[in-house]
Amino acid sequence: MLNRYEDAAKKAAEKFRRTAVSAAQANIIPYKSENGQWIASPYDGNSWWTGGFWPGLMWQFYAATKDGFFLEEARRAEKLLVDEFRTFRALSHDVGFMYQLSCGADAKLTGNDQAYTDTLHAASLLMGRFNPAGYIRAWDGENRAGFAIIDCMMNLSLLFWASRETKDPRFAHVAKIHADTALREFIRPDGSVSHIIEFDPETGKRVREHPGQGYALGTQWSRGQAWGLYGFTLAYLNTQDARYLDAAQRIAANFIAHIRPDGLTDCDFCQPDTEERIDNIAGAVAACGLLELHKITGKEQHRSSALRLIDGLLDLCCDWTKNRCGLLTKCTASYHDDGAGRHTNITYGDYFLVEALAKLNGTDPMLWR
Ligand code: GLY
């Protein structure tokens, strides 16, 4: 008999197999489900930072089931993402999220040589965003030359991978410089992390913190906390540098202290009590980070906290309706901007919930390394 996590992963694979057909027919990369139907990202077409999560989901299901349908669907989305290299100008530091879960996964799971080349290309684009003043630039746009964001900790794995593959330390050097800057400038004494820090692009000196996707300046946007938790854990796995492990554990302790009694995650840990704003993506990302952290530390609190988060999502926020697209509900893209999605399904929430289940079930191909 399947346990609840195996059962959830099996049902998820069946649901996505059924609903992926409409995405393939429309030749879109699903961003979220609206009225039960997949819709593409409303921003920047296929260059939007979330494009890797759909193929990442397909590769997770392929790794678990070996069903060729998922491989075909992942490659369909991968082609759309690779086409974005030609236009290039809307791509950002998030090429790690985009291409490690698509081309990188393909290369890892099937040995596809072109996918391997495309993943190296993405790593080179990320290198091109490095400012030798000490950080990887997040976004393009006027007055943003000095912007770095905590989310980038997840993109660094692409650089560590490229150094291992090419036996050229340049990529890893850049990743470590950025991680050291994040260690120094983003982590606060209470273990919380800032979302956006602006540096002087000429000198690298800190200019100021900016309010990002959380409630307000200086508060704790929960998904940013989760990116820091998982991102520093990955930085440790890639370097064995104990400072990154210590950072991951401090961020984890703060995150764990803020898990709601029902296991769900507020959008910002400092939001007013009167506002019900949940971001289940944050809980799913944090669960993945905590499960990886548990493998390193062996601390029961890391695993039991991950289970509290996953159980909360399975108990309260999964839409198992057969023909409605999207699984995880109550995902919120940004505290103040409802346009990208508030309390709705968003595919990167689905991705991290499925990755967390795969970790528990022993099928996770660990696409981040
Ligand atoms: N990386 C952007 C976000 O988490 O919304």
Image: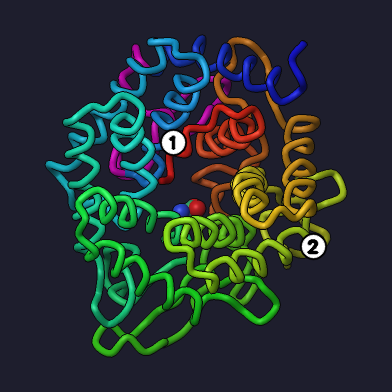
**Quarter containing the N terminus:** top right
Which residue is label 2 attached to?
257
Range drawn in magenta: 24-47
Q: Amino acid at mark 1?
A: Phe
Q: Which residue is depicted at the point 72% across and 38% down?
A: 310
Q: Is 2 on the left-hand or right-hand side of 188?
A: right
Q: Residue furthest left?
A: 86
Which residue is label 1 attached to?
53
Give how far across and how far down residue 297 sits, in percent: 67, 57
Q: Which callout, 2 or 1, points at the residue further toward the start of the chain? A: 1
Q: Is 158 on the left-hand or right-hand side of 63?
A: left
Query: Is residue 48 located in the magenta-colored stretch of the structure?
Result: no
Q: Amino acid at mark 2?
A: Ala
Give how far across and how far down residue 367 sits, in percent: 43, 39
Q: Is residue 364 visible?
A: yes
Between residue 39 and residue 352, name the one nearer to us: 352
Q: Is residue 335 visible?
A: no
On screen, residue 157 above or below 134 = above
On screen, residue 312 above or below 35 = below
Q: Is 161 on the left-hand or right-hand side of 352?
A: left
Q: Is mark 2 within 8 Å of ligand 1?
A: no
